[in-house]
Amino acid sequence: MRMRRRTRTVAVAVAVAVVAVLGTFGVRQLRHADAGSAATVTQTRRVLPAAQRPAAPVLDGRTLTGARLSTADWQGKIIVVNFWGSWCAPCRKEAPALRRISAESYAQGVRFVGVDIRDSQANGSSFEKDHRITYPSFDDPDATLSLRFHALAPQATPSTYVFDRMGRIAAVFFGATTYDELNSAVELVVEKG
């Protein structure tokens, strides 16, 4: 009982920190079935004004195919980072939109990378094959890459970030996103930085 109370307290503290960083905007409540949980989480989407953008973390490690990858190699590019898991129903639902935006925006200097969290490599690879995902995904079974975001760490699965060309977090989507929502944010960052 104490552990549950402590876990809830930590979750509330993190949520308060995120709201403090992002402010109040486009916040919705949804039922989130994350690995069997039926907890209510906050679904948040926000494009940050240039003056309020924190530095984006460098993500590096092995991909699901075993290749080494670092977002530092994409310096000067717009980077979309999507945290997902094969066990996540909202991740399956948004996968076609991500795949489409990745293909449509590549020529504009936008690079997509996934982070497969709390998953096995076999299940993650099957997910990518089933959904015809062509961009790489980090294999992150312990969800350690999410810790690099500090106060802006993913609050739901899926979570998506857009990094601008200057290596700053330009947009945040906690919870599933749609083609229109994410594409609008990517286009804004492409056009206005």
Image: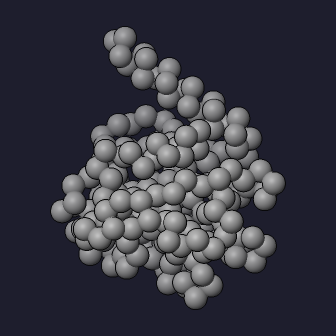
Relative to 26, 36 lies left or right = left
* Residue 4: percent from left, percent from top: 37, 19
- Compared to 35, does 182 lie above or below? below
Q: Residue at x 57, y 58 (%)?
A: 161
Q: Residue at x 60, y 81 (%)?
A: 109
Is residue 16 something one can see in this rendering?
A: yes
Q: Residue at x 35, y 16 (%)?
A: 3
Relative to 96, 163 lies left or right = right
- As drawn, the residue found furthest toward the bottom would be 107
* Residue 26: percent from left, percent from top: 69, 49
Question: Quadrant of residue 178 in the image?
Answer: bottom right
Is residue 94 something one can see in this rendering?
A: no
* Residue 163: percent from left, percent from top: 61, 63
- Compared to 136, does 162 lie above or below? above
Depth check: give the residue in front, 96 or 136. Answer: 136
Depth check: give the residue in front, 78 or 37. Answer: 78
Question: Quadrant of residue 121 in the image?
Answer: bottom left
* Residue 177: percent from left, percent from top: 54, 61
- Compared to 17, does 124 lie above or below? below
Q: Residue at x 63, y 30 (%)?
A: 16
- Compared to 92, does 41 lie above or below? above
Figure quadrant of the C terminus = bottom right
- As drawn, the residue found furthest toward the top would be 2
Figure quadrant of the N terminus = top left
Q: How many marks?
A: 0
